[in-house]
Image (tube, rainbow, N blue to C red):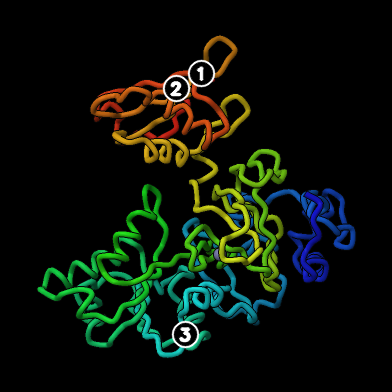
């Protein structure tokens, strides 16, 4: 890819180089100067800083590992993610970009939003609160738990939008129906803005939409970067805002991959306080073709898992989501698992399927489905009885001897 870069990037890199010692070190090591970076190919010369590496740097040079590029007194908040990883929020980063997601979902003046994300330590609850106020909505700061009380609030306050994990939203709805309330007749909720799940999450969302008379939306965000992608009405992956440069990269080499290939989501931000450059989120996704909504912006597929869960066989990474999705695409298959072993000097890729009875052609269908998802044909497809794949085993297993 030699595409041009957004207009803000040169000034951002200069600012980061001058003010964030960690960014200066990264660029001096190459070496490359901010002015040398004119294309995405140039940007790729800067090595990826993984989340683990960021944690190491923060431990070695607390609290922000040399990435802070404004005086500490200017910070709005310091959030604490598991690690502990410190996420500074600068003066210009109100809402950490979530305004885009809420506007795209049609949230605005007149909406009463129950926000059930955590307001403690982590950014989620508080930054979404900021963004909701910014787009003109009214917020009920519910926070985590208290499902009985929060469910009642939805009715008493006429809540129109609920923010939370998919599971907590279901808990709230079932709390109300369990008390004899008829939904959707008795509530005004028109939008559930939900945290993502693996598995057949889109089908689950469709069921919730029909059952409770609402639409659903979602976004992709991390504590370090804030909002990375948001859904449009098409609900097909996450649009990336023009305030970020997002690349899908080979997790080993850091090189950008062709559109459609799975790899690590690597983000360069326009955040002046915390100017992460080529930050490796550890999340796995792939770039989708332009959206049916007409917005030409880059679009990421729903997350496929974490980089550390991948197993490399025959020079190709296999991700748990590919095993899971292979199973979802095959009628009569409950579960699928990929097991990689070594056969002499060759990797052997076994696709295991749990099924009541193997329909004719299932093996070939499974082989095709896995090929379409992973660009690799399994060496062997084995149909097994339900329960054969231990529930606590990963969906991709590496059984090669070191
Ligand atoms: Zn779209």
Q: Is residue 348 visible?
A: yes
Residue at point 85%, 58% (across, down): 37
User: Mark 3 or mark 1, which is nearer the start of the sequence?
Assistant: 3
Frontmost residue, 308 versus 220: 220
Q: With respect to residue 110, does 286 lie above or below?
A: above
- Label 2 close to label 1 by CB (< 8 Å): yes
The CA span between labels 3 and 2 is 50 Å
Q: Is ligand 1 closer than 8 angstroms to the Cβ of mark 3? A: no
Can you identify the residue that label 2 sits on?
A: 350
Can you identify the residue that label 1 sits on?
A: 348
Frontmost residue, 243 versus 380: 380
Q: Position of residue 333 (x, y in %)?
A: 31, 33
Q: Which quadrant of the figure has residue 253? A: top right
- Callout 1: few (<14), some (14-19), or many (20+) C-alpha neighbours within 10 Å? some
Residue at point 29%, 63% (across, down): 208
- Callout 2: few (<14), some (14-19), or many (20+) C-alpha neighbours within 10 Å? some
Frontmost residue, 269 versus 331: 331
What kind of element bears circle 3?
loop
Q: Is residue 238 left or right of residue 113?
A: right
Q: With respect to residue 360, does 141 lie above or below?
A: below
Q: Nearer the viewer, mark 1 or mark 3?
A: 3
Q: Position of residue 117 (x, y in %)?
A: 38, 70
User: Mark 2 or mark 3, which is nearer the start of the sequence?
Assistant: 3
Frontmost residue, 186 versus 246: 186
Exactly how many numbered labels are in the figure?
Answer: 3
Can you identify the residue that label 3 sits on?
A: 108
Q: Which quadrant of the figure has residue 357? A: top left
């Amino acid at each position: 890819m030699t595409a041009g870069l957004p207009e803000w990037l040169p000034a951002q890199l200069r600012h980061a180089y001058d003010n964030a010692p960690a960014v200066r070190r990264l660029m001096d090591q190459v070496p490359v100067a901010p002015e040398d970076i004119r294309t995405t190919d140039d940007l790729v010369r800067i090595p990826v800083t993984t989340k683990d590496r960021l944690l190491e740097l923060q431990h070695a040079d607390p609290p922000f590992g040399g990435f802070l590029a404004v005086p500490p007194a200017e910070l709005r908040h310091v959030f604490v993610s598991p690690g502990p990883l410190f996420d500074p929020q600068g003066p210009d980063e109100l809402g950490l970009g979530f305004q885009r997601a809420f506007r795209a979902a049609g949230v605005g003046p007149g909406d009463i939003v129950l926000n059930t994300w955590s307001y403690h330590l982590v950014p989620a609850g508080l930054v979404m609160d900021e963004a909701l106020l910014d787009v003109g909505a009214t917020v009920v700061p519910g926070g985590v738990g208290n499902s009985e009380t929060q469910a009642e609030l939805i009715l008493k306050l006429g809540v129109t939008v609920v923010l939370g994990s998919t599971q907590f939203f279901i808990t709230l709805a079932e709390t109300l129906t369990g008390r004899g309330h008829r939904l959707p007749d008795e509530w005004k909720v028109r939008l559930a803005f939900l945290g993502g799940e693996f598995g057949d999450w889109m089908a689950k969302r469709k069921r919730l939409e029909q059952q409770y008379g609402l639409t659903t939306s979602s976004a992709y965000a991390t504590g370090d970067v804030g909002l990375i992608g948001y859904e449009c009405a098409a609900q097909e992956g996450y649009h990336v805002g023009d305030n970020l440069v997002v690349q899908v990269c080979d997790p080993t080499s850091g090189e950008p991959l062709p559109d459609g290939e799975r790899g690590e989501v690597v983000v360069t931000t326009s955040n002046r306080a915390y100017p992460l450059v080529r930050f490796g989120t550890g999340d796995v996704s792939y770039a989708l073709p332009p959206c049916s909504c007409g917005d030409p912006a880059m679009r990421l597929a729903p997350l496929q898992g974490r980089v550390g869960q991948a197993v490399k066989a025959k020079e190709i990474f296999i991700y748990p989501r590919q095993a899971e999705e292979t199973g979802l695409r095959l009628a009569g298959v409950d579960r699928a698992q990929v097991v990689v072993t070594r056969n002499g000097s060759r990797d052997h890729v076994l696709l295991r399927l749990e099924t009541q009875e193997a329909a004719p052609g299932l093996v070939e269908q499974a082989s095709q489905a896995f090929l379409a998802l992973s660009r690799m044909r399994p060496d062997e497809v084995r149909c097994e009885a339900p329960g054969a794949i231990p529930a606590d085993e990963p969906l991709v297993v590496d059984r090669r001897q070191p």
